[in-house]
Amino acid sequence: MALLRPETRLTATERRIADHLALNWAEVPLASAAEIAQDLGVNPSSVTRFAQTLGYRGYPDLQRAVRLELRARHAPAPLPAESQAAAHWAREMAVFTALAALPEDRLDRVADRLAAAQRVWVTGARGSAPAAAYAAHLWRGVRPGVHLLGADAGADPERWLDAGPGDVLVAFTVRRYAQGTARLVQTLTARGVALVLVTDGPAAPGARQAAELLVLPAPGPAQGEATEGRFVPLAAPASLTALLAAKLVGRVGTARLEAAERELGEHDVLTY
């Protein structure tokens, strides 16, 4: 862990906490002391004392320090100068090869939830916002009751006050994880909304609450290269979204798509 000095003396419990945080470094800014304590089976006060051992007033100060360090590392990773295009496409192809290995039954379960839900809420912030917007655009063309919730939705409760049991929230979130998405996930799952989390790691905020967890492959780093430095890749979530839309059509039919086409008939652009 970058903020742990070699000479720092730790108790056995503090060493367990240090090892846990080192393995989940990128998730520290969004993981509460209580969640860490629950993962390790220790008292939350032990997490607070650990932060104080490192010289912080408490765990929130440790979180802020980690957040600043992660921000400093968040710069686009350069591609090899001699063949940037080849390196880029090789990474993308590797992602789709891994994506094709996702179990079909898991995707079918998500499609079943999308078809059966009373309402579908879709959210994503920062780099994940375009993936969420594309998903909402495709899915609302197939079924009614699809609502896009932006990064500011947590401060605008009128937009999701009707959410409750029978609904599904699809949250797109990749590093760096957004606090707004984490708060919205907590709020809607507490209201009985089933969560489908589309993310880049099984330890992402919301994974504990997810009814379905889809971990998408991300472009792999080169030797010694930090993954936090990459642009958010959208090819994988966009392709997944289109696949789920096709599966959704198979479950609910094409009536809504056809009705939309009839309405657009007089107003759409000319096609040849």
Image (cartoon, grey):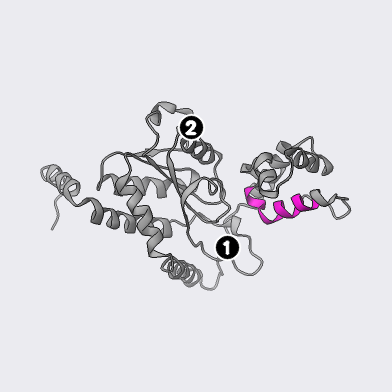
For residue 92, say whether it is visible: yes
User: If you read the primary sequence from the N terminus, does the residue marked by circle 1 or circle 2 appear first?
Assistant: 1
Above or below, comparing residue 69 to residue 100 in the picture: above
Foreground label between 1 and 2: 2
Q: Which quadrant is home to the N terminus?
A: bottom right
Rendered location of residue 25, percent (x, y): 67, 52
Q: Is 133 placed left or right of 175 in the picture?
A: left
Mark 1 and mark 2: Cα distance apart in space: 35 Å
Residue ID at (62%, 48%):
27
Does dot 1 land on a helix, a strand or a loop?
loop
Q: Give the number of the disc on residue 78.
A: 1
Is residue 84 positioned above or below 37 on the image? below
Q: Position of residue 256 (x, y in %)?
A: 19, 46
Q: Residues within 10 Å of mark 2 (few under 14, many from 20)?
A: some
Indicate the quadrant where residue 109 lies. Answer: bottom left
Task: Please give left or right for residue 182 compared with residue 58 in the image.
Answer: left
Q: Is residue 2 visible to the viewer in this orientation of the structure?
A: no
Residue at the spot of label 2: 154
Q: Is residue 187 above or below residue 79?
A: above
- Image x and y of residue 204, in percent: 56, 50
- Tell me which amino acid carries mark 1: Pro
Image quadrant where one finds the C terminus: bottom left
Give the quarter of the image for residue 236.
Answer: bottom left
Q: Please tell me whether mark 2 sits on a helix, a strand or a loop.
A: helix
Q: In the image, which residues are magenta? A: 15-27
The stretch drawn in magenta includes residue 203: no
Prevailing secondary structure of the magenta residues: helix
Residue in front for this viewpoint, 20 or 173: 20
| Kind of residue at disc 2 | Gly
Could you tell me residue 87's position as x and y percent? 50, 71
Q: Which mark is residue 199?
A: none
